[in-house]
Amino acid sequence: MLPLTWHAMLSVYPGGVLFEVRQGPYLQALTEEDYMHWALPEGGEGIEAVMRWYTNAQLGDQVYYANLKP
């Protein structure tokens, strides 16, 4: 994956663990301004639909939040 590429992961197994290793150097801690404008807030309205989409997504699929139904 190219540096500074935004991505997401979802464990489909209860209690699953995801371990991501990244080559440094590392940037400063993220601030509110670093988050994508289109990203839903954690626990916010519509997040259940996004999680359903992640559960069924296939390699190469792209999510369009406006098309998700609550």
Image (spheres, helix red, strand yellow):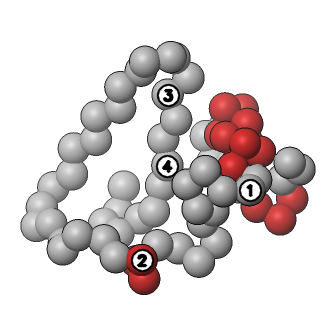
The reply to whether discs 1 and 2 touch (Cβ–Cβ < 8 Å) is: no
Say which amino acid is labelled 1.
Answer: Glu
Label 3, secondary structure: give it: loop
Q: Residues within 10 Å of mark 1 (few under 14, many from 20)?
A: few
Which is more N-terminal, label 1 or label 4? 4
Residue at 23% from the left image edge and 69% from the top image edge: 29
Say which amino acid is labelled 2.
Answer: Glu
Which is more N-terminal, label 2 or label 1? 2
> Which is in the foreground here, disc 2 or disc 4?
2
How far is disc 4 from disc 3 in space, using C-alphas?
Answer: 10 Å
- What residue would you read off at disc 2? 32
Which is more N-terminal, label 2 or label 3? 3
Q: Residue furthest bottom?
A: 33
How far is disc 3 from disc 1 in space, using C-alphas?
Answer: 21 Å
Q: Residues within 10 Å of mark 2 (few under 14, many from 20)?
A: few
Q: In this rendering, would 42 be left or right of 47?
A: left
* Residue 54 quadrant: top right
- What residue would you read off at disc 3? 11
Say which amino acid is labelled 4.
Answer: Ala
The reply to whether discs 2 and 4 touch (Cβ–Cβ < 8 Å) is: no
Label 1, secondary structure: give it: loop
- What residue would you read off at disc 1? 45
Residue 62 in view: no
Q: Position of residue 22 (x, y in %)?
A: 21, 51
- What residue would you read off at disc 4? 8
Label 4, secondary structure: give it: loop
Q: Position of residue 21 (x, y in %)?
A: 21, 44
How far is disc 1 from disc 2 in space, using C-alphas?
Answer: 18 Å
- In the image, 61 versus 54, the foreground residue is 54
Look at the picture and state if 70 lies above or below 30: above
> Which is in the foreground here, disc 4 or disc 1?
1
Q: Residue furthest left?
A: 25
